[in-house]
Structures are given as C-alpha cells and as structure tokens.
Image: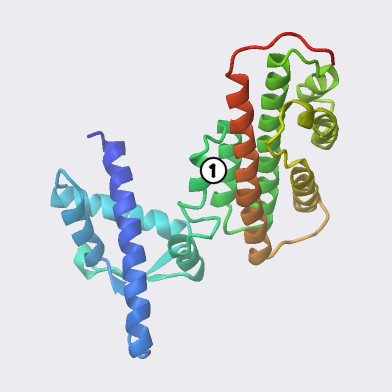
C-alpha cells in the first residue's frame, strides 16, 4: 500500500472514530452534564491500531495521527485541550464548526455530503467547485459564491448533453450550440435559450420523460442572485444557515439535473435516427 493510500485510509478511520466518540460523549453528558466534554486521543490511536489492515507500526501510527489532528486543528474543527509527550496523553475538544462538519452529514463541510451527486458521475468541473465550497465552510459567503458557480457548471453540462442528443436525433440547435461555447454569452442567456428550446421540442420526441426545466430555471435564478451578491462588492454577508440552505438546494436540484442528464445520454446511446426538420 502506498503512503498516500495509507494516509487516506487512516484519515477515514480517525474521522469515523471522532464521530463515534462524539456521540458517546453526548450520551454521557445527558446522564451527567458535569463530566468533561473532551475525549482522549488514545481512543483514536486504538482505532488506527485495530481497524487498519495490514497493521500500521506504532511509530507510523503516531506520526499519522499527529499529522491528521493538526490538520483538523488548522481547519478549525478541533482544538487541543492537553498535549503531552505522547499521544496517550493528548485530549481534544470539538469546536462548534467541527461538531457540524464531522458529525452532521447534512452539513456542506461533511465528507459524505456530495455522495448522491458523485454517484451520478458529476463532471470534474462541477465537482471542483463543490469541493471548493465545502472547503470554504468557515466563510458562509464564500460557500454561497462557490456553490453558485458549481450549479452553473452542472447546468452547462446538461445543456451540452442536450445538444448532443439533438444532433443524435438529426435536429438542429444552432443558436443554443453557439451560445453554450461562447464566452461572450452569459450563463443566464444560455439557460434561457435552453429552456425555450426544451419547452418547444422536448415533448414531441420524448414522451414519458420529465424535463424539469421550470425547476432548473428557478434554481439558476436563485443561485445566481445569491452568487452575485456574494461575489460582487455589495457588502452582503451570508449566515451559516443561509449557506447550508444554498448547498442543500444544489444537492437536491443538482441530483435532478444529473438524473435528467443520464436519461438524455441513454437516449443518445441508442441507434441513430434519420435527419429531421428543425
């Protein structure tokens, strides 16, 4: 196993152990609120020792654990309560943001947040921006801005898939095809042309397949308004709950976009049909 692969496995084991320890701490505090909310790092070391195969040598476990814990400290997710000479003497607390990011799976900064989108083969471009949004979790305004860019990347992917489908059907979408690759055309204009084209032609050759263009258009308008407010010097600052609502909107509606895109690509993969009049 490579060093990077070992580090990634170790990181997932430590994060899972952190979640488990947090839940145990919550249960303990319910019965005895006077107990300390911190917990010992030695329990994380035990998780690394018994849950990673092949076993990690003790010296390597300590180095890996120190590296991962300081990474979480730098990210503002935990802070050390006591640092001793050895890992066994360490103890840590969760920060408020750390509790949310590590233990709350609906949080934009939780590593499982994007699972539903990734499973549907989200494009590299959209994934980059969504990952950036997650890494900006300390700044809700930055989350809103990056989530907006990610959403527009998803919609552009959908438009490209739609144009490929029209070509497969022997139809022409000259205006839309020119706009989608033009840097001079705004994303809003590209989406307006796309929606108009779908509303005009979709039901004539794709009966039984829902085309959620109204939701996509509403999503883009809401996302764009917030993205512009966050990214331009407007002085607007977003709260954490607003950023999370934005990311949840991206996740829910993004899934619909990707499901529709998958249907379009499936149709495009069938036997080519003869030319049709536009």
Q: Which residue is tagged 1?
A: 117
The reply to whether residue 92 is visible in this rendering is no
Residue 67 position, x and y percent, is 32, 51
Note whether 91 is above or below 136 in the view shown. below
Q: Quadrant of the C terminus?
A: top right
Coloration of the structure image: rainbow
Note whether 207 is above or below 112 in the view shown. above
Residue 85 position, x and y percent, is 21, 65
Residue 220 position, x and y percent, is 76, 45
Residue 124 picture quarter = top right
- For this view, does 202 lie left or right of residue 244? right
For the point 58% across and 52% down, which residue is it? 136
Of the pair 63 and 1, the residue shown nearer to us: 1
Of the pair 183 and 82, the residue shown nearer to us: 183
Q: Residue furthest top?
A: 274
For the point 79% across and 12% down, which residue is it? 276
Q: What element carries label 1?
A: helix
Residue 189 picture quarter = top right
Residue 76 position, x and y percent, is 48, 62
The reply to whether residue 63 is visible in this rendering is yes
């Amino acid at each position: 196993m490579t060093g990077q692969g070992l580090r990634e496995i170790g990181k997932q084991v430590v994060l899972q152990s952190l979640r488990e320890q947090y839940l145990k701490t919550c249960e303990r505090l319910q019965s005895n609120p006077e107990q300390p909310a911190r917990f010992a790092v030695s329990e994380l070391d035990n998780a690394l020792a018994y849950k990673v195969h092949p076993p990690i040598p003790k010296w390597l476990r300590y180095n890996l654990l120190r590296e991962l814990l300081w990474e979480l400290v730098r990210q503002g997710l935990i802070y050390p309560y006591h640092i001793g000479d050895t890992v066994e003497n360490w103890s840590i607390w969760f920060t408020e943001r750390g509790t949310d990011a590590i233990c709350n799976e609906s949080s934009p900064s939780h590593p499982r947040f994007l699972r539903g989108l990734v499973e549907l083969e989200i494009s590299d471009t959209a994934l980059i921006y969504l990952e950036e949004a997650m890494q900006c979790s300390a700044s809700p305004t930055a989350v809103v801005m990056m989530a907006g860019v990610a959403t527009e990347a998803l919609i552009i992917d959908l438009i490209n898939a739609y144009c490929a489908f029209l070509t497969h059907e022997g139809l022409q979408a000259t205006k839309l095809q020119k706009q989608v690759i033009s840097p001079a055309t705004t994303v809003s204009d590209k989406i307006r042309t796309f929606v108009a084209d779908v509303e005009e032609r979709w039901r004539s050759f794709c009966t039984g397949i829902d085309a959620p263009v109204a939701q996509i258009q509403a999503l883009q308008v809401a996302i764009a308004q917030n993205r512009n407010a966050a990214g331009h010097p407007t002085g607007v600052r977003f709260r954490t709950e607003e950023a999370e609502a934005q990311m949840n909107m991206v996740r829910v509606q993004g899934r619909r976009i990707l499901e529709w895109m998958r249907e379009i690509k499936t149709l495009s993969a069938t036997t080519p049909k003869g030319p049709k009049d536009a």
